[in-house]
Image (cartoon, rainbow, N blue to C red):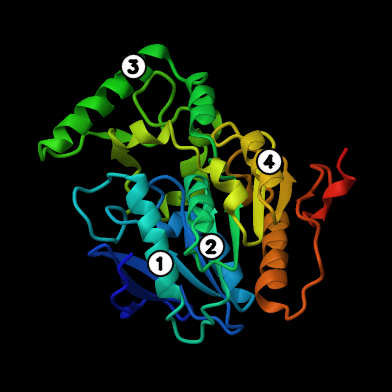
Amino acid sequence: MNLVSSEVGVRASTEREKVHFVSAGTRCAAWHYPGTNGACVIMAGGFAVTKEPGTDPFAKRFHDAGFAVLAFDYRRLGESDGQPRQVVRIGEQLADWQAAIEFAGTLPGVDPTRLAGWGFSVSGGHLLRVAARGTSRLAAMIAQTPNTDGPAALRNAARFQRPLALLRLTGLGILDALGGALGRPPRPVPLVAPPGTVALLATPDAQEGNDVLNPGNAYPDWQQAVAARSALALGWYRPGRDAPRVRCPLLVVVCDQDRTALAEPAVAVTRRAPRAELVRVPGHHHAPFTAEHEQVIEAELSFLRRHLTETDPMPRHPVATVPTSAPAATPTPADSRS
């Protein structure tokens, strides 16, 4: 959680600039979009998804609405430092979140009491654990199609993969972990591949990920592979258990046909978190980036405005839901649910 610098690099566009912060001695890279309303949204992509494909469509809309944004790469991934590369460690990523939050509070024009976290997929699960800590400075958080129950997601993923490929992935993960302990380089596996191929995921909606997040190879530097050892801990990761200790306002976005992170474990989080709201939309894991983008972004902007920029926000019921047939993703009171 070591915050060291606000080193500003070359401006990438008229809207954002490259900045760096330090987490446990490792320099992490981020995009900073200056805002106008004093609030800041800290963002990270899904499992081994770097900041550009994982956050760009949402970061731009938040920025256009006046929010500052800090979208970062975890250590060992993307433009951040850290060796060996493409190794995902849950504890390290949680520490990177805490460092990013501390850094965001020091950015020019940002009120450190008005910080929100936004996480997609595995990062949405991370935010539950980060926000549950007593030291968290988050005033609000958005978990978009979060992976909240690793064992449930693992069992579901196994339905779409062939047994031999699963055995080979497990064996490679163990060998890679043993090799890592001896200082050997990682054994990479693809993030996504067709069933029968050794990869982290073979679910149907995961197959859509590259076309959705990287259309026309817009982000050629995104390495869509991860060290095999990284898969071992993910299957046992259950950040949803921290939901009762998340005291800040929480918006959970789920997709009813999500076959990667699963909708129901995320819905269960909203029943246990004290100040949760729920938005449900139809579609697969990446629907908030595609067909449901406008509904989801409007719901997220409404949530951020209510909790970060309105001086006297209207009281809300602790959990809200949206029917999948609703024309817009505007939360409705929890006690209207059957």
Residue flagged by tag 1: what amino acid is it? Ala
Q: Indicate the quadrant where residue 193 lies.
A: top left
> Relative to residue 286, is residue 114 depicted above or below?
below
Residue at image point 51% right, 22% down: 155
Q: Residues within 10 Å of mark 3 (few under 14, many from 20)?
A: few
The residue singled out by tag 4 in the image is: 267
Q: Residue 98, how many percent across, how many down?
A: 41, 63
Q: CA distance from mark 2 to mark 4?
A: 19 Å
Secondary structure of the residue carrying tag 1 is: helix
Q: Earlier in the sequence, mark 4 or mark 1?
A: 1
Q: Nearer the viewer, residue 221 or 49?
A: 49
Residue at image point 23% right, 48% down: 85
Residue at image point 50% right, 44% down: 211
Secondary structure of the residue carrying tag 4 is: helix
Mark 4 vs mark 3, foreground winner is: 4
Residue flagged by tag 2: what amino acid is it? Gly
Mark 2 vs mark 3, foreground winner is: 2
Asked whether disc 2 touches disc 3, contact meaning CB atoms under 8 Å apart, the reply is no
The residue singled out by tag 1 in the image is: 100
Mark number displayed over residue 58: none
